[in-house]
Amino acid sequence: MSLVDEVTITVEAGSGGSGARVFLSTPGSNRKRADGGTGGDGGNVFFCASTNVSDLSEFRFKKELRAENGVNGLRKNLTGAKGEDIIVLVPRGTHIIDEQGNENEITDINTPVLLAQGGAGGIGNFDYKKRIEEFDENYYVGGKGEIKVLHLTLRLIADIGFIGLPNAGKSSLLSSLTNARPKIGSYPFTTVEPHLGVMGNLVLADIPGLIEGASKGKGLGIQFLKHIEKTKVLFHCIDSTEPDPVKTYQIVRREFEEYESEIKDKEEIILLTKIDLVDEGEKNLRIDLLSGLGREVIPVSIYDEKSLDILKEKIEKFAE
């Protein structure tokens, strides 16, 4: 599935129903008495974390969310029904900021967070029957619900992030390890946004390939680096056919160093990919060169079940 990890949406709480202005006549008398009930309150907008939601793709096209308005008051001093609340489900760790700079972190799956308050119902004239002449006409009208523009950002998109230069084999690995079906091709930027897959209890992400100069905005640039920030562990994919695998590794690491964040401090494992395309001697030479960088190196090919099993065992350890 394509990942959406940052969106801006508008939420609108329901307006309160208007209070009723009705009078009840008494049989045999010219006197009337106020008999209108209060309007129902408008529905609220809550946000709640859910373990069943992995990203913000629900809001890719649905940019406005509205709660129900309260029902107008009725005769016989009957209060109108309250507007129905809406509860918006988002991934755990979703960061929300509104136009006023107010921030919320949605993490608790059991406690919804109120982000837009419904308007109060207008007061019916029954409550003012003794001083109806003094009553302000505006009080009959229900209050407006809050309208807020919210910017939602995921703090974490995946447990494992496959990173590397374009065409390093990230998408193929994700497809082999999970049920994800990212677009795969032999040209740069086949992946232009992260794709997610699930392996057991872990979420794996194929992060778009970066190029030299990404930290300065070249190619997919800062967008790529922001995605990497939202993963726990990095699996750095390096194509075994690269003539200088150490240089290839250093290109990515240099971008990490120049980008001011904690990416460079994340746990990292090197995956030497596409080992079916080189002979045993070339494979071992590249493993030795990359091992000199002080990282664990795992050789893998999507056509070698044994190497995939070894990789799966390594990934599964991060679920323990």
Image: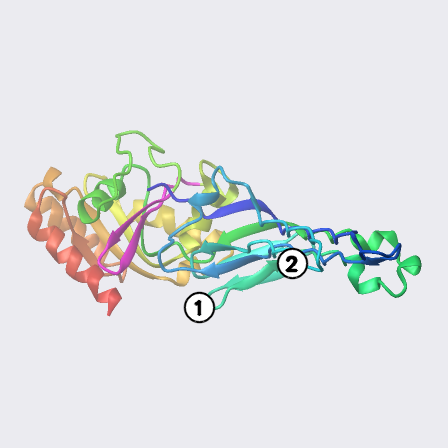
Reply above or below: 144 against 132: above
Kindly identify the residue that appears in the image at 93 percent across and 58 percent down.
133
Q: Earlier in the sequence, mark 1 or mark 2?
A: 1
Kindly identify the residue that appears in the image at 21 percent across and 66 percent down.
317
Q: Is residue 197 magenta?
A: yes
Left or right: residue 277 compared with residue 175:
left
Left or right: residue 24 compared with residue 30:
left
Label 2: which residue? 117
Specify the segment rendered in magenta: 194-212
Disc 1 and disc 2: Cα gap in Å?
19 Å
- Identity of the amino acid at label 1? Asn
Quadrant the C terminus occupies: bottom left
Q: Secondary structure at mark 1?
A: loop
Quadrant the N terminus occupies: top left
At label 1, counting other C-alpha atoms closer than 10 Å, the crowd grade (few under 14, some 14-19, many 20 or more) is: few
Q: Is residue 71 magenta?
A: no
Q: Is residue 244 visible?
A: no
User: x and y percent of residue 3 in the render?
Assistant: 39, 44
User: x and y percent of residue 89 in the render?
Assistant: 45, 55
Left or right: residue 105 compared with residue 312:
right
User: x and y percent of residue 112 in the render?
Assistant: 51, 64
Q: Which mark is residue 319?
A: none
| 243 or 127: nearer the viewer | 127
- Identity of the amino acid at label 2? Gln
Left or right: residue 79 compared with residue 281:
right
Kindly identify the residue that appears in the image at 26 percent across and 30 percent down.
186
At label 2, counting other C-alpha atoms closer than 10 Å, the crowd grade (few under 14, some 14-19, many 20 or more) is: many
Q: Which mark is residue 110?
A: 1
Reply above or below: 122 against 107: above
Kindly identify the residue that appears in the image at 13 percent across and 51 percent down.
308
Q: Quadrant of residue 77?
A: bottom right
| 62 or 133: nearer the viewer | 133
